[in-house]
Image (cartoon, coloured by chain):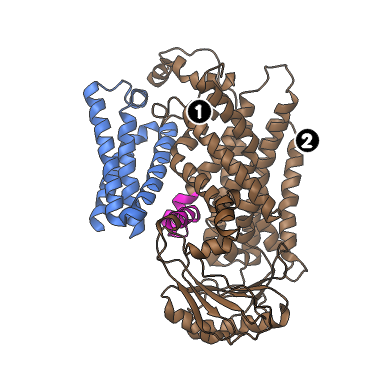
Amino acid sequence: MTPIVLLLTIGLSYVGLAALCLGMNRHHSAIFEARPDPRRALLLRSAGWIAIGLSFASAVHFEGWAFGPVQWIGGLTAAALLVVGILSYRPGLILPTAALVLPVALAAAISI
Amino acid sequence: MKNGFRQSMAWLHTWSGLVVGWVLFAVFVTGTASYYRSDISLWMRPELRQEAAFSPEDLARAAEFGVAHLQKHAGNARTWFITLPSADNPVLDLFWRTKPGTPPSQAALDPRTGEVSGLRETKGGDFLYRFHFELHMPPIWGRWIVGICAMIMLVALVSGIVIHRRIFADFFTFRRDKSAQRGWLDAHNVTGVLGLPFHLMITYTGVVTLALMYMPWGVTTAYKGDNQAFFAESGQITAPRPPAGRPGTLAPIGPMVREAIATVPEPLERLSILNPKDAAATVVAVFEEPHGLSHEHPQVAFDGVTGAVVEVRQGGLKPAAKTFTTMVGLHEAHFAGPALRVLFFLCGLMGCAMVATGLVLWSVSRMPKAGEPAFFGLRLVQALNVGTVVGLPAAVAVYLLANRLLPVGIADRSGWEIRAFFGAWIIMALAALLRPHRRAWTEGAIAVAALFVAAATADALTIGEARFLGFDTALLVLAALFAYAARKVSTYAPPQRERRSRQDSPALAAASRQPAQAFRTQKVLNEA
């Protein structure tokens, strides 16, 4: 069960961190060639925090208060490393990968 | 503080990090490898094959074999340790200690026959594990040095957080197309910030594991310096039983093993037999940890002469002791299954990278202008950087390679493996001193890549079993990483200094809009 919960945690963290990063001027400009307008930035940032909150909630829900936070921090770190790597080497892939990861994470959540 | 708080912290971060950086790199690398300690040990004893599970009856018989061997060969020892076999590790490992401070003697027996097994003699993953906190020095010295370095690491971590003004703004930023210094600073920030929860946890809990040694005064006052009494009273071990000073005969061990297994549901891991020839001999059966964050082994203590149970220790720790054992548990991560273990390993690698990039950053930001000679301190740091950052991985690769290439029967084989480890490290460090700096990096990284390929190849040629495919693949991945690094170093050209036209790309335009802010952290570092 743990690997699937980890997949869910990393997936949700990845989507959340990707949204947070797109909500920042510098990274949004690098990908969409323009700064985000304030509403779009707010939307991306709230979506990002909600996804990260969900990843924490799901980790604690499925693994309990002892292992949940430990696994969540591990998953969040791995997801952040992925975002930074993709952003530096293939910035155009941030959005497609996030769009791909979201259904995978949801499928993982359903299969648990 | 004439320069203000942040500049003082920058100074502190720079110099505290530099002074202990090389030791910390070694501690991080061997610690990260220790997450796979048992896998390394299995790879290094390829004669061991997975077997059917051992029944309580098998374990009782194996323990009898162990005691018989120890009676014969270790009659004078004060303590015997018997690691019992398991399906994954089907060997009976014996250790004994005759005098305090001397290295333990050891033997490996076949658990089904009691004969000395034909395994190659090796310290396996245990060498890297002990190096992680003892640096292969006398334990007291090594533990103090590692402990002091870890405490300074905490200083470097906290001062690093203080001087990093743009933790959130630069959270995802890794600029590879700017100056070399900018790239290294970003890499240092990314590996430091993203892994920060792990770095803080691992450094703090690392100091906590040996806290009793670093801060003994509480135990000195309350228990007159008797650590064992403290551990026993706080419920972490069974109560120590001092020797009676009269000779005694050890009761048969088999019935004790059976009774212990019947008492505790966890698998039985090892037996400690204290003062085996004394009238107050004690046998302690130590079990694997139950699933949980906390590091606490259930234990059953027997009177060694009568064979009666003296004490059963299973859970029930008070909050303070539980906090301590949970921190130790988090540090060791025995609870982590394969998937979570990969993440711990990844975080460990980020720790290695954080230390290495910090060391490199120190030298890159002090590069002399074109035409000026490098000052002595810079040359020294550069050589130590190469000697450590590629020297240690080369030493690890040679340690594994020696395990496959040294003849199986030679005397002191495990000692030769360790000599190969240090020999390789010394050669790499000397080579780094003799070669021009950039060449030293390229050649060092190529040497590491070649050595890891050699270790995997030697395994394929001498053992060639499918069960080591995963391990060998990991070695090849490491080799590929170092080969990639070598290529990067040799083809690196400093980016053009002149400002590019803003029409080039919107990304550049956006990035160049805030140069003043972006370079502030770097400026702080320069001023230090």
Residue picked out by circle 2: B434
Q: Is residue B391 left or right of residue A27?
A: right
Q: What residue lies at 44% left-to-right and 32% top-to-bottom?
A: A88
The reply, left or right, for residue B357 in relation to residue A100 is: right
- Magenta region: which residues? B322-345
Query: Is residue B316 on the magenta stretch?
Result: no
Q: Position of residue B151 (x, y in %)?
A: 57, 41
Q: Position of residue B153 (x, y in %)?
A: 56, 39
Dot 1: element: loop
Chain B palette colour: brown
Pick the residue in front: B105 or B507: B105
Q: Amino acid at mark 2?
A: Leu
**Horizontal arrangement in the rendering, residue A55 relative to residue B68 (left or right):** left
Q: Residues within 10 Å of mark 1 (few under 14, many from 20)?
A: some
| Chain letter, blue in picture | A
| Location of residue B504 (image quadrant) | top left
- In primary-sequence order, the first of circles 1 and 2 is 1
Does residue B333 show up magenta in the picture?
yes
